[in-house]
Amino acid sequence: ALFPASPKAAAAPGPAEPAAEWRGSGAVLVADDEQTIREVTAHMLRALGFTALTAANGREALEAFRAHQGEIACVILDLTMPELSGEETFRELRLLDPAVRVIITSGYNEQEVTQHFAGKGLAGFMQKPYQMAVLRATLREALKA
């Protein structure tokens, strides 16, 4: 049997907040020794509604975190950096704030990286290079209450 066409467009019931329109707030600290990655990520974060703070290495990241601790919603941390590695910086951040939300980024795959952080409260992982959609989805997941 054929049914008459409805004048209304069919719309699937979706979530109240479509993923592609999700926006964040607060500051996100990006620690990466590659300037291009810091700049591109900071640009994407601003497009998502965040304030972007950047650090070129783990020591700078810890200084920035101490200076802005009350406003930082999340830290995006490169695994391999000079001075303090991502792993060492992660440990130090957890000492400053045990509830800090940290997303690790790396050119290595997720399994190789996340085994080092098993049970340590990692908020997320992004394999480099990552796109806006991945950044948005990872932050959205990491910042769930």
Image (spheres, rainbow, N blue to C red):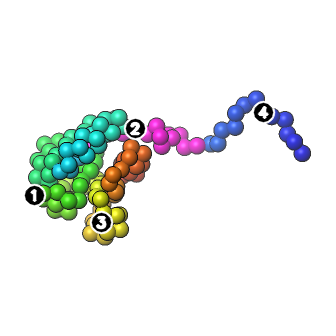
For the residues marked 4 and 2, what is the alpha-carbon distance in whole angstroms?
Answer: 34 Å
Identity, as a three-letter code, of the amino acid under mark 4: Ser
Identity, as a three-letter code, of the amino acid under mark 1: Glu
Q: Which of 44 and 63 is in front in this view?
A: 44
Report which residue position mark 3 lands on.
Answer: 113
> Mark 2 or 3, which is nearer the eye?
3
Q: Within 10 Å of the Cα at label 2, are there few (<14), some (14-19), or many (20+) other Cα atoms?
A: some
> Mark 4 or 1, which is nearer the eye?
1
Label number found at residue 23: 2
Q: Per the image, is 2 magenta?
A: no
- Point out residue 59 in the picture as x, y percentages from the top left corner: 10, 52
* Left or right, residue 47 beside residue 13: left
Q: Within 10 Å of the Cα at label 1, are there few (<14), some (14-19), or many (20+) other Cα atoms?
A: few
For the residues marked 1 and 3, what is the alpha-carbon distance in whole angstroms?
Answer: 19 Å
For the residues marked 2 and 1, what is the alpha-carbon distance in whole angstroms?
Answer: 33 Å
Q: Could one spot residue 95 in this view of the protein?
A: no
Q: Tag 1's secondary structure?
A: loop
Whether pointer 4 and pointer 2 mark residues with C-beta atoms closer than 8 Å, the reply is no
Report which residue position mark 4 lands on.
Answer: 6
Q: What is the magenta segment's predominant secondary structure?
A: loop
